[in-house]
Amino acid sequence: MKKQCIIYFALLFCGLFASLVNAQGTQSLRRVTVTSVTLRFDSVNTASEAVSVRNLITAHAEVNNFDIKLNKCNFTFTQQAFAINDFLAELEAAGYRATVKDLQPQQTFS
């Protein structure tokens, strides 16, 4: 009886494993890291400067959920080709010095 139970569970496990492999083969899952960022600015004091910052950041396709208030902005981005240091360097080159107030990587699947 014990041997039959072991064989039964081994076959059940093999069947579940085969189903999992088959499901992964038919659906292409890919891991995407989405990062939530809050930046604080020293030099964004007017609405036109805020618009300029928004245009610089949202020019990148990987940016989503952008929100800006004077001296602070929040957005999310996928880390495929661009990192937070790239955003900071681009902003500083345009004359907008920013510091990272909050950075939260999150894992999602699509």
Image: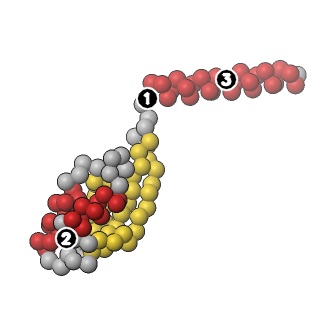
Label disc, if present, on residue 27 of the rendered structure: 1
Element under disc 1: loop
Residue pointed to by mark 2: 95
Q: Which mark is residue 50?
A: none
What type is the residue that disc 2 sits on?
Gly
- Name the quadrant of the C terminus: top left
Q: Earlier in the sequence, mark 2 or mark 3?
A: 3
Q: What is the three-letter code of the residue carrying label 3?
A: Cys
In the image, what residue occupies the spot 45% across and 24% down?
A: 26
| Residue 18 visible in the shown view | yes
Q: At numbered mark 3, what does the secondary structure look like: helix, strand or loop?
A: helix
First in residue order: circle 3 vs circle 1:
3
Residue wearing tag 3: 14
Q: 61 or 3: which is nearer to us?
A: 61
Tell whether 54 sits left or right of 32: left
Q: Position of residue 105 (x, y in %)?
A: 44, 57
